[in-house]
Amino acid sequence: SEPLQEQHSTTTTYVVVSISCSPRSSMAKAPGASLGPVPFADVEADSGLVSGVPEQLPEEHADADLVSALPSAPMAMGISNLRFYEGCWLPEWSVPAAVALQRRFEPRRDDVIVASFPKCGTTWVNALTFATMARRAYPAAGAGHPLLRLNPHQCIPFLEGLFGSRRGEAKLEALPSPRVMNTHMPLAMIPRAAAPGGGGCKVVYVCREPKDMVVSRWHFHRQLHPELAFADVFEAVCSGAVAYGPVWDHMLGYWSASTARPDSVLFLRYEELLRDPAEHVRALARFVGLPFSGAEEDAGAVHDIVKLCSFGHLKNLEANKTGHVNPILQIPRGALFRKGAAGDWVNHMTPEMARRLDEIVADKLHASGLTFHE
Ligand code: A3P
């Protein structure tokens, strides 16, 4: 999530790449074929992976004018300034990373990117995507599953975090296929990811009812700034000047791509995932080219993934209860698992505030076909 990005953390952003189009009925491993994504934290720990690549800043970071020439706004959460780059308010540190991403990110056809606006269900969809794609190597009910010992954000690299250094880029390059990555960047910053014509990789986007996103964001940032007023976060979101905002433009970019290229962009909604997680896991599996076989269905593989990644299960794992998402910002991992429900905005917003944000969002999404109904 966003404050982690401030420190170039490996926060989640997802890109899932199809492993194979062979029928799931066998799920047999073809000679030389990968069994699915590897947990990024395990690969990252292998220092031999990028030996010889210095921890050196890419040229975009040395270009001071790149950032200073852009319009700026203070971040309501008091973490860093925002800069307006190509229609998006980005945290200042991530502007060079965005430019580097645009210039050098080369998607592989079997990559999968999980994309989201912060606080919209990133952690959950990261876990579901990883568990679904990695199920041949790691059955979800297995005692050795990586999600039992690692936070979901440790399993999937944070794309813009990696593009903060040459070594980060090298790590991404060295990651075996299929790669799963995570980003909060708008689609325009990863133009080759879901490229028209099917040349890019696949993108899984999760969006959330904006009022609940505001509430979740306020609670999360209060971990660092207990004095933060809810009204300040609300106003920032309404103005559009919030990290990765405006939120409506973020959603619209992925929404439009998903309607134009449904094979490349899967558009998920947090509230619908809550309503029927199993059906969405099936859709996710089909999307990445790994539909569940009859045998897997009979064996309860879908249910196992839903259970493994459920809020109640993940929240209570030691890997998610202890430690910090980011060692510098010291945000407890537990903050990623707060309430896990829809509709909490009624406990934080006046009816007037709710109406105002609803109207802004409805106006901005007008005629797109994307709507939010309670
Ligand atoms: P709340 O603060 O409303 O509880 P992100 O991962 O993008 O930062 O989003 C965080 C939101 O997703 C939080 O919402 C968090 O509780 C919720 N969440 C995290 N894991 C979840 C899970 N497995 N199932 C449902 N919701 C989850």
Image: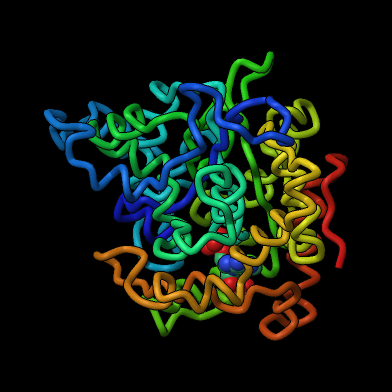
Query: Total number of numbered labels?
Result: 0
Q: Is residue 207 above or below residue 275?
A: above
**Vertical order, 100 against 45 (above or below):** above
Instruction: Name the residue at 53% across, 30% down.
Output: 111
Which image quadrant is residue 141 in?
bottom right
Left or right: 353 in relation to 233: right
The location of residue 313, given as percent across then percent down, is 57, 74
Q: Residue at (76%, 45%) from the top-left corner?
A: 295
* Whether residue 30 can be seen here: yes
The one nearer the camera, 90 or 200, is 200
- Viewer-proximal residue among 270 and 149: 149
Image spot of residue 90 (x, y percent): 45, 46
Determine the residue positioned at 58% across, 29% down.
19
Q: Quadrant of ligand 1?
A: bottom right
Q: Position of residue 87 (x, y in %)?
A: 55, 37
Q: Residue 254: horizontal and vertical position, in percent? A: 68, 38
**Of residues 304 and 73, the one drawn nearer to the viewer in this rendering:** 304
In the image, taking residue 96 as reference, residue 350 lies left or right, namely right
Q: Residue at x 81, y 65 (%)?
A: 275
Q: Quadrant of the C terminus?
A: bottom right
Q: Quadrant of residue 26?
A: top right
Position of 339 with respect to 104 (left or right) is: right
Q: Is residue 233 visible?
A: no
Which residue is nearer to you in this view: 351 or 334? 334
